[in-house]
Amino acid sequence: MASQDIYDPDFVRDVFDRCSDRYIAFSNACSFGFTQIWRRQCVEMLDLPPEARHGYDLMAGTGEVWPHLLSHSPQVESIVAVDISAGMHRRAMDRLHAMRAHKIEFREDDVLASSLPDESADFVVSTFGLKTFNPDQHRRLAELTARVLKPGGRFAYIEASDPKGWPLRPLYRLHLDQVLPMVERVLLRGAHDFAMIGQYSANFGDAREFSGMLEDAGLNSEFRKFFFGCASGVCGSKPASSKATSQSDYEATTP
């Protein structure tokens, strides 16, 4: 493992292809349902206007944000789901979203290598994909977000994070670093794949630095924390004019 680049796109694809059959159940159970709460909160901070019709779900995984997005913003007509793992998308369509297939277009691709058209999206949303990128990849993702959004378009990202400074952080880290790998070994007989979630999250930290990268790319960006920092996110918009207006960080501790 030490000799492998865990952020290499091929490595990430293989991990999530192997995880795909059990990912939904494992994610919900081991987060005690918080992943679904955080997906809903991500859609709420996306805060789409009535005219928003078309957008991208980047690192779309099993598409669990789609029900929240389409319920909150029923005017949305199409979502292009971009993910490097075809296995995750098959699971999404087989398990959850066959009835929404007419609104979903899937692109099996490395997001950072995708030729998504300039100013083609009213919104960009992403849940729990940031941790699989290193800082250089985060900067490229920020630039891609700015490039594909239409003027006035909105974005929201959310990610499991390391709640530094929280008194219960040691228990949180114990859960990620010890409990999840044990559950995988005993119940799932996995190949260390789900245990990678803890490693990715520890390396990621939180979304504050990514928020700065989005501002550097010309976007208005707000940084937010959820449940004492166990998740963090960014949201904002592309200015209608060419000059971005920087916004101060906004931190909300929301259960």
Image (tube, rainbow, N blue to C red):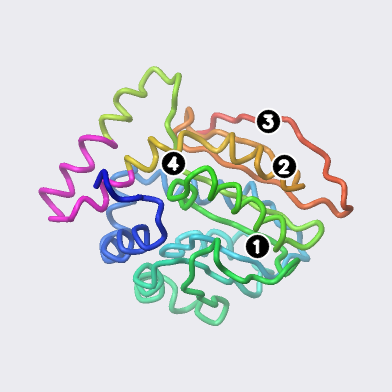
Answer left or right for 182 relative to 252: left
Q: Residue at x 50, y 53 (%)?
A: 127
Going by the numbered disc 3, the residue's amino acid type is Asp
Answer left or right for 226 relative to 178: right
Q: Position of residue 156 (x, y in %)?
A: 62, 50
Q: Nearer the viewer, residue 129 or 2?
A: 2
Q: CA distance from mark 2 to mark 1?
A: 29 Å
Quadrant location of residue 89? bottom left
Q: Residue at x 64, y 70 (%)?
A: 116
Element on which disc 2 rests: helix
The segment highlighted magenta reads: 176-197
Q: Which residue is mark 3?
A: 249
Q: Residue at x 23, y 42 (%)?
A: 180
Q: Which residue is mark 4?
A: 160
Q: Position of residue 74 (x, y in %)?
A: 64, 67
Q: Position of residue 138 (x, y in %)?
A: 56, 47
Q: Residues within 10 Å of mark 3 (few under 14, many from 20)?
A: some
Q: Earlier in the sequence, mark 2 or mark 1?
A: 1
Going by the numbered disc 1, the residue's amino acid type is Ser
Going by the numbered disc 4, the residue's amino acid type is Ala
Q: Earlier in the sequence, mark 3 or mark 1?
A: 1
Q: Which residue is mark 1?
A: 73
Going by the numbered disc 2, the residue's amino acid type is Asp
Answer left or right for 69 relative to 109: right
Q: CA distance from mark 2 to mark 4?
A: 23 Å
Q: Is residue 172 above or below residue 122?
A: above
